Image (cartoon, grey):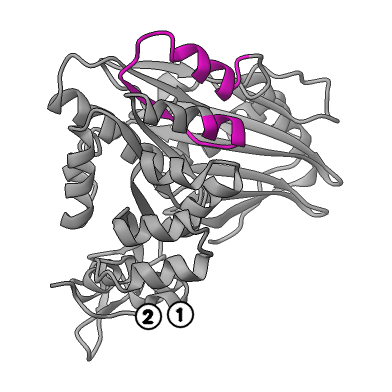
Amino acid sequence: MKSSAHKQSGPHTEVVSLVESILSQAVTSRATDIHFEPTAEGLVIKYRLDGLLAIMETLPKAIADNCVARLKVLGGLLTYRNDIPQEGRIESEIGHYEDVMDLRLAIFPTIYGQRAVVRILYQNDQLVDLTQLGFPTSVLNILQDFARQCQGILLLTGPAGTGKSTTLAALMRTILQATPGRSIVTLEDPVEIRIPGVTQVQISPHGDMTFPVALRSLLRQDPQVLMIGEIRDAQTARIGVEAGLTGHLLASTLHSGTPAGALLRLVEMGIEPYQVTSSICAVINQRLVRQLCDQCKIEQPDQTFDAAGCDQCLHTGYTGRILLAEAIQLDRTLRQAILKHADLEELEMILAAQGRDTMAMHAERLVSQGNTSRQEIARVLGYQQHTTSNEQPN
């Protein structure tokens, strides 16, 4: 992105206008995060567009502190403390922007000054149903079957920012529609998507009500369906597995690169293998890849497409993102391997022999349909994983 500079040492009103402009342009561009990064030369402004950071401009060092101070005022933070991390919420600006549900602010001190990140959460009415998210049929069927069950656990895996919260919210809506009248409670940090008909609880990272404390207490509130934003520790994992074994339906996320890795991580957290095999219904692994811009994508001799770049896509060649996903269910062979404390390599070999619809297969379909490029798939999945299988499932 082209860099530009603003006038130095302007009055307070100029800084107010400048920060408002940065926030407004980010929302217009559908950025999900704004980074204010202090350097020796100035304050670098970056937008996260479709998952990647892009430098938008560099502000003079003379106004860097004033810009961050303005953000702290908007977020209700302590302007006189520049030596500690702070987190807040920019309340006053939310109503100014269409579709913006929340603006989260985080401040962190560095050697060149305070670094600020604003996370923008949008309300997207087009992503409220599982059928709208772009899951392959095999994965969608597993999710819809789980929504009709009475007990068990479904885990979503993948790095941060891959749409897991959106999937969980859509799953809760599906459960409401499939089996009306069930008591559904969620524990989230933070609550990102409002779901009508669901009791949502926000867990504060610095409060006394931690995930384990809240989850244990909730089990005495007669819930039938539980959603935990993330299983972060062994205590939460143990209570969650107990819930899944005692008549509750539970969905959560777990940071892991692969579905097999998620199963092993539960064992590493102290969950007995027999509890894993008895409670886990399925593991969904998902990623987001950038979608090629329809206005400028270039067809190649092999009938796939590459990114080019135009004004409409801000010269990135991409606009928006689409879902990649795969799922595993625990069959007899996989359960026996877990009970025998199989390692990751053994579990991966068992899954490879199942003939299931893998993420690599889903990626290849999206490339062949002209939705994304091979370069983008390689960036997200890694070249080796993408090229492990180009076969289509039967």
Circle 2: element type: loop
Relative vertical location of residue 347 with respect to residue 364 in this rendering, above or below: above
Amino acid type, callout 1 = Gln
Count all numbered tags in the image, as a single digit.
2
Circles 2 and 1: CB distance less than 8 Å?
yes
Q: Would residue 224 be counted in the magenta stretch?
A: yes
Q: Position of residue 231 (x, y in %)?
A: 52, 36
The residue closer to the viewer here, 340 or 344, is 340
Residue 260 appears in the picture as rendered: yes
Write the start and end of the magenta stretch as one range.
209-238
Q: Would residue 56 be counted in the magenta stretch?
A: no
Amino acid type, callout 2 = Thr
Circle 1: element type: helix
Q: Residue at x 68, y 24 (%)?
A: 72
Q: Position of residue 31 (x, y in %)?
A: 45, 45
Left or right of residue 61: residue 275: left
The crowd level at tag 1 (other Cα within 10 Å; few <14, some 14-19, many 20+) is few
Q: Residue at x 45, y 80 (%)?
A: 384
Query: Disc 1 designates what residue?
Result: 384
Query: Disc 2 designates what residue?
Result: 388
The residue closer to the viewer here, 286 or 264, is 264
Q: Residue at x 70, y 19 (%)?
A: 77
Left or right of residue 197: residue 377: right
Left or right of residue 214: residue 196: left
Relative vertical location of residue 303 with respect to residue 394 in this rendering, above or below: below
Residue 316 in which image quadrant: bottom left
The crowd level at tag 2 (other Cα within 10 Å; few <14, some 14-19, many 20+) is few
